[in-house]
Amino acid sequence: MSAPDMPVPGRPEAGVLAPPHPAGRLPRISARQRPLIGAASLIGVLLLWWLLTSATGLVSPFRFPSPAEFWAALNQFLTDGYAGGTLWVQAWHSTRLVLMGFAVAVVTGVPLGLVMGVSPRAEALLNPAFLLVRPIPPLAWIPLAIVWLGLGDAAKVLVIWFAAFVPSVINTWTGVRGVDRTLIAAARVHGAGPGRLLTEVIIPGSLPMIFTGLRLSLQASWTTLVAAELVGAFYGLGRVLDAAYRDINPPMIAVAMVVVGILGAATTRLVAIAERRLIPWRS
């Protein structure tokens, strides 16, 4: 049989069907397809929203606003303001608190996770206290934070810090423990001291898990901020939600929720950009 006549594996005439994509891999979406798929999904959600509210009236405006009511509330928020400030004032106040609490959590949580992951003695010393504090919900700290720091921003930053602190510690510790021990042993054989071992092997190897923890911490920060601002806040998106609830104003509630979602997605996107810059092999 000549070479052209020989059956080629993977061809239908050879009796073997070629797999649609390499074994063990899911089909990948190209960079051009992602925006199109996202836009189609968003358009579908908006169309469903219009159909359920404005077109058919299946959802009462007292339960969820129509697109027209949402747009009117957004214009009011942008121009006249609501609950003591315009959208920009309220959004900046909330974003500033989130960034402050998140930054303090990163500065304290990541080093603690590194120390506990690298040193068994430090883990034995610190882990019992961490395990005792870890199950406490962040919102449970609100009354104590108010007693300690009053109704100002410092109390909210404390609550946000605790919400972001726990994921950063856990994921950093997990990342350090997940570093290949063969790499650590090889670095020691080649004369790497503790400092170089930490900066050139352990930290780079644990960066993927560290950034996973940072994303979770940022999401927890936004969730906790809104809840913290529902109690004793003078400005912020949580304050807007509380005022809209008291005024029975579903369109303004929806506007504040969407703004929180957009800000949360934007800040998470910034973390993803930093992750791609620091660990480009993961992109």
Image: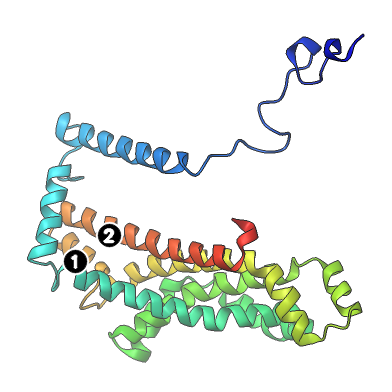
Task: Report how far apart the C-alphas of labels 1 and 2 lie in the structure.
Answer: 9 Å
Q: Which residue is mark 1?
A: 87
Q: Indicate the quadrant where residue 180 lies.
A: bottom right
Q: Which residue does the image show at 65% across and 59% down from the upper left?
A: 281
Q: Which residue does the image show at 40% across and 80% down from the upper left?
A: 100
In the picture, which quadrant includes the N terminus? top right
Rate crowding at label 2 as few (under 14), some (14 to 19) or many (20 or more) other CA atoms within 10 Å. Answer: some
Name the side, left or right, on which 71 lies relative to 40: left
Q: Position of residue 59 (x, y in %)?
A: 20, 37
Residue placed most toward the observer, 186 or 210: 186
Q: Position of residue 101 (x, y in %)?
A: 42, 79
Q: Which residue is mark 2?
A: 259
Residue placed most toward the observer, 33 or 237: 33
Tag 1: residue type?
Answer: Leu
Q: Indicate the quadrant where residue 227 lies.
A: bottom left
1 and 2 marks in contact (CB < 8 Å): yes
Tell me, what colour scheme is on the image?
rainbow
Tag 2: residue type?
Answer: Val
Would residue 38 be seen by someone viewing this image from the given angle? yes
